[in-house]
Image: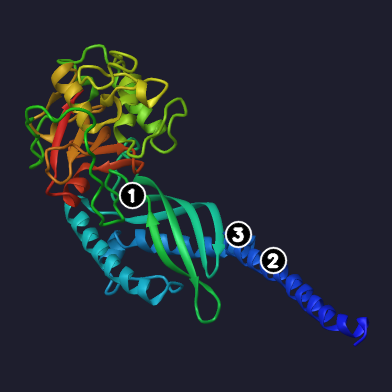
Amino acid sequence: MSKIARRLPYALITATVVALTAAVPASAAGSEASAEAAEPRPLAGSEVRDLTGVARAYLQQRADSVTTAGAHRLAPVVPDRATPELRKGLATEFAQLAGMGRVYEKASGGYSGAKVTVTTGKAEHKGGKATLRLTESTSLFYPNVRSADEPKAEEYVLDHTLTFTRDAAGKWVLAEDRPDLGAGDVTTYNTPPKTEQPAGAKNEDRRTASSATGHVAGQRTANDKTALAAGYDYTAMVNYANHYWKNPNGSYRTYGNDCTNFISQAMKAGGWKQKGSGYFDRKDKDKWYYGGHTWTTSYTWAGAENWYWFATKHSQRTRILPNVWQMGLGDVLQADWDRDNTIDHTMIVTGFSGADEIYLTYHTNNTHNRKLTNLLAARPHTTWYAHRT
């Protein structure tokens, strides 16, 4: 056999190996392309507008469920562009909200209408799913508003993460809504508010709660609050809350549960003096101050339970009222949602409707002028602490 003949098998083997070797990078490149395709990618502008429209319609239907019109529908109105599973779940949920609407109607006249606007955030898709983040701004209007000074509506702001999938026709349909519910009550959701664990040492001796039964004659206004806190500017407290309820003051940090941080800011705006500073004082319940870092800010500044002990026991800047209906402008209401002897939420009085109604404003979720009557009706098993500031 000649040398050329002997080399032919080797050449064929070499060619085969080269061919196989060349195929590997192509396969790897395909894998890399698939991996890249699996990464979330921005949605096209037309798709974002489409999904935003679906989301807005859904949130409007949700808000409408608690209005007087929604409360008396024969059947709840649910989104057309939603998965069958979600439509079924929302039918049950909207019926429950309608039931609450009837409760609100009996308690305070309810809500005459709702208006929802949305601000779109990040929108992307991965595989067969699309995710849309947006901020809902909703107004629930009060009926029979009697004066220009009386709040016209309850307002709230709520962040959502919405998930969409494609139906059989290839159209995006809503599959899931994950609202960023915080420590405060949100009117259009039945989910119980989050509970908060106090920072630092265990609770001290138990406190005396405020009654929430019935209206009390002789409600006080801001001008009547002279016995405990001469020198405090209650108008400034209320103005601060009205100004920053929706968009937090950039001079301060925000917290996951921001309600007490917000109230401390309002108290400071009204004349409360800070006490203490730095790292070593931050756990003391007789100190109250804000620092440039979380570790140089007192626990009493942003913790609902801790704030109670500083305000009422250690500084005596507040006293607990026997009945929530005795609160005046700039007073503070705290809630223990599940009656576990830990305060979960903090609110401030920002309005009145004659002698019949008190309006509350709070953060997390950011809510403006919620009627006390409606809050009591929604959360009848709560322990309340009404502070005269």
Element marked by disc 3: strand
Element marked by disc 2: helix
Image height of 165 relative to 204, above or below: below
Indicate the quadrant where residue 269 lies.
Answer: top left
Q: Amino acid at mark 1?
A: Leu
Colouring of the image = rainbow
**Residue 230 horizontal side relative to residue 24, left or right:** left
Image height of 192 relative to 357, above or below: below
Label pair 3/1, CB-CB below 8 angstroms: no
Residue 133 rendering spot, x and y as whole percentages: 49, 54
Image height of 7 relative to 299, above or below: below
Label ID, residue 288: none
State the quadrant of the N terminus: bottom right
Please give the residue where the numbered disc 1 appears in the rendered image: 181
**Residue 322 horizontal side relative to residue 291, left or right:** left
Residue 206 rendering spot, x and y as whole percentages: 7, 31
Please give the residue where the numbered disc 2 appears in the rendered image: 29
Please give the residue where the numbered disc 3 appears in the rendered image: 41
- Whichever of labels 1 and 2 marks the residue nearer the N terminus, that label is 2
Dot 1: few (<14), some (14–19), or many (≥20) neighbours within 10 Å? Answer: some
- Whichever of labels 2 and 3 marks the residue nearer the N terminus, that label is 2
Dot 2: few (<14), some (14–19), or many (≥20) neighbours within 10 Å? Answer: few
Element marked by disc 1: loop
Residue for point 32% across, 39% down: 257
Label pair 1/2, CB-CB below 8 angstroms: no
